[in-house]
Image: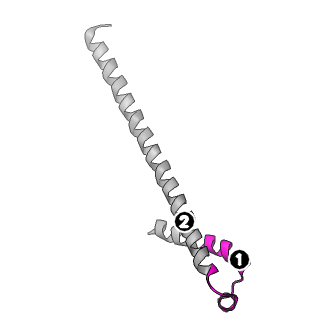
Amino acid sequence: MDYLSEIRVRAEAERLRAESLRNASKSAARWLASLINRIASKSAERRLVAELSQLDDRSLRDIGLDRVQLQNVAKRIVANENWRRDAA
């Protein structure tokens, strides 16, 4: 292999390495964003359940809920808000 061919091979190897590192960093960034979104969603769910739990039974009945439903309602509300945010 002559010197010019060797330089070409090294350049191609370096290009492939750089491309691989870019792809890996993009994948890590997507994973981290997904993790942060899940943590934020769970935190919002817990805050919403805590706020709804502070209401008395009569207030909950007035809005059509009972205490058993609070966790599921919070999940649906947060999921709906996340969907709206992602769609915008």
Circles 1 and 2: CB atoms closer than 8 Å: no
Could you say which is closer to the camera, residue 17 or residue 2? 17
Q: Secondary structure at mark 1?
A: helix
Q: Quadrant of residue 5?
A: top left
Q: Amino acid at mark 2?
A: Ser
Q: Secondary structure at mark 2?
A: helix
Q: Disc 1 versus disc 2: distance between alpha carbons?
A: 18 Å
Segment colored magenta: 53-76
Q: Is residue 75 above or below residue 12?
A: below
Disc 2: CA contacts within 10 A as few (<14), some (14-19) or many (>=20) = few
Across and down, in percent, residue 76 comes to 62, 72
Across and down, in percent, residue 23 comes to 43, 39
Is 72 part of what is drawn in magenta? yes
Q: Residue at x 54, y 69 (%)?
A: 44
Which circle, 1 or 2, is nearer the viewer?
2
Is 37 part of what is drawn in magenta? no
> Closer to the N terminus: mark 1 or mark 2?
2
Could you say which is closer to the camera, residue 14 or residue 25? 25
Could you say which is closer to the camera, residue 31 or residue 18? 31
The residue tagged 1 is 69
Q: Residue at x 37, y 23 (%)?
A: 13
Res. 79 in view: no
Q: Amino acid at mark 1?
A: Gln
How many tags in the picture? 2
Q: Is residue 36 above or below residue 3?
A: below
Across and down, in percent, residue 1 comes to 33, 7
Q: Does the magenta stretch mainly form a helix, a strand or a loop?
A: helix
Q: How is the image coloured?
A: one colour
Which of the labelled discs sits on residue 1, or is there none?
none
Res. 32 in view: yes
